[in-house]
Image (spheres, rainbow, N blue to C red):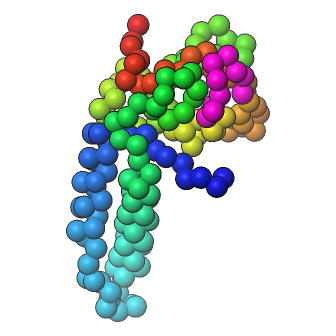
Amino acid sequence: MTSTQRTWLTQNAYDRLREELAELLGHRTGDGDDAMPHDPDSNEEIMDRERRQARIHQIEDLLKNAVVGEDPPDDGVAEPGMVLTVRYEGEEETETFLMGLRDESVGGDIPVYSPNSPLGVALTGAREGEQRTYALPNGRTMKVTLVKAVPFGHHTTS
């Protein structure tokens, strides 16, 4: 993939990530760099710094590629920021979810699936009526049809 994947975020999610990043950067100090190798806490401190650093990089990448508060085009194509209604092969019922990052401001009325999940990857770029296949954790495959795709801002619960 030659292009960077953009991440759809609500303003609330973007603000929370910026706050978390500021807090993590506030903890970035030289403390513990001179710890003795035999210090029992030194390995734990090193691992904690590495986890913090990894999270800092993850948040920086998310923020750098974020699309904040903008709805994607209302073109019926599955992409982050769209509310997707799908039907799994052999099922009569449909399932509706937001393709994006989990965010408390979205509310509990709609599940959120990551565009990086197997289902999200399979559906990205699908048009209404198109069927896609994706791998299940048990190694089997599942066929899913995109029934409808609307921007999150246009979605209404019914």
Q: Is residue 145 magenta?
A: no
Front residue of 9 and 95: 9
Place of residue 143 in the rendered image (x, y in percent of width and height, measured from the top left): 73, 24
Place of residue 133 in the rendered image (x, y in percent of width and height, measured from the top left): 74, 30
Q: 58 above or below 67?
A: below
* Helix, strand or loop for the magenta stretch, by majority: loop
At 77% across and 33% down in the image, what residue appears? 140
Q: 68 above or below 95?
A: below
Q: Is residue 131 magenta?
A: yes
Q: Disc count in the image?
A: 0
Q: Is residue 112 visible?
A: no
- Could you tell me which quadrant the C terminus lies in? top left
User: For the magenta stretch, what is the residue range?
Assistant: 123-132
At 61% across and 15% down in the image, what residue appears? 147
Front residue of 131 and 73: 73
Place of residue 24 in the rendered image (x, y in percent of width and height, measured from the top left): 28, 64
Place of residue 27 in the rendered image (x, y in percent of width and height, measured from the top left): 25, 70
Q: Is residue 71 left or right of residue 133?
A: left
Front residue of 34 and 147: 147
At 50% across and 32% down in the image, what residue appears? 99
Q: Is residue 122 visible?
A: yes
Q: 148 above or below 12?
A: above
